[in-house]
């Protein structure tokens, strides 16, 4: 998944009123709208997809440097003209 594709997915979530967007291997991206999870299509994410997404969202190279030991990460990601997102990985 490219950074542009990720930004498009985030933009679709904002336009549809999603409070959360979940990226999990084995599932399509899930948007939480009014407390209900809705899949975006039926293409399931692979572990490599989610690793790539994390790499785009975790823009500090030091964060990804210790990926193998990473337990949890909190940060933010901005898409200019769309929104700023809170990220938990």
Image (cartoon, rainbow, N blue to C red):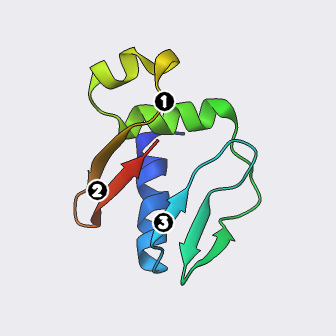
Say if mark 1 contacts mark 2, CB within 8 Å.
Answer: no
Residue 79 is marked as: 2
The CA distance from mark 1 to mark 3 is 20 Å
The image position of residue 89, as x and y in percent, is 47, 41
Going by the image, does 82 lie left or right of 37? left
Q: Please tell me whether residue 37 is drawn above or below residue 51 in the rendered image.
A: below
Tell me the number on the disc at residue 10: none
Q: Which circle's residue, 1 or 2, is located before the other in the chain? A: 1
Q: Residue at x 74, y 49 (%)?
A: 44
From this view, report whether residue 26 is shown above or below residue 28. Answer: above
**Residue at 29% across, 19% down:** 62
Q: Residue at x 39, y 22 (%)?
A: 64
Pointer 2 or 3: first along the chain: 3
Label 2: few (<14), some (14–19) or many (≥20) C-alpha neighbours in 10 Å: few
Closer to the eye: label 1 or 2: 1
Local secondary structure at mark 3: strand
Which residue, given by chain and number where applicable, does mark 1 sit on? 71
- Which element carries disc 2, helix, strand or loop? strand
Measured in 3D between alpha carbons, the distance from the residue under mark 1 to the one under mark 2, in whole angstroms, is 25 Å
Q: Residue furthest left?
A: 80
The residue wearing badge 3 is 20
Left or right: where 39 falls relative to 83? right
Point out the image quarter for the N terminus: top right
Horizontal arrangement in the rendering, residue 25 relative to residue 81 (left or right): right
**Disc 1: CA contacts within 10 A as few (<14), some (14-19) or many (>=20):** few
Residue 29 x, y percent position in the rendering: 62, 57
The residue positioned farthest toward the bottom in the image shown: 34
Q: Return the disc, 1 or 3, that comes first in the chain's sequence.
A: 3
Residue drawn at x 44%, y 61% as measured from the top left:
10
Secondary structure category for the residue under label 1:
loop
């Amino acid at each position: 998944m490219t950074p542009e594709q990720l930004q498009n997915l985030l933009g679709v979530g904002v336009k549809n009123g999603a409070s959360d967007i979940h990226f999990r291997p084995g599932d399509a991206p899930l948007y939480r709208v009014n407390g209900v999870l809705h899949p975006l299509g039926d293409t399931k994410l692979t572990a490599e997809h989610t690793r790539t997404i994390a790499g785009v969202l975790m823009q500090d190279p030091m964060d990804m440097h210790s990926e193998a030991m990473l337990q949890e990460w909190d940060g933010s990601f901005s898409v200019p003209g769309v929104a700023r997102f809170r990220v938990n990985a």
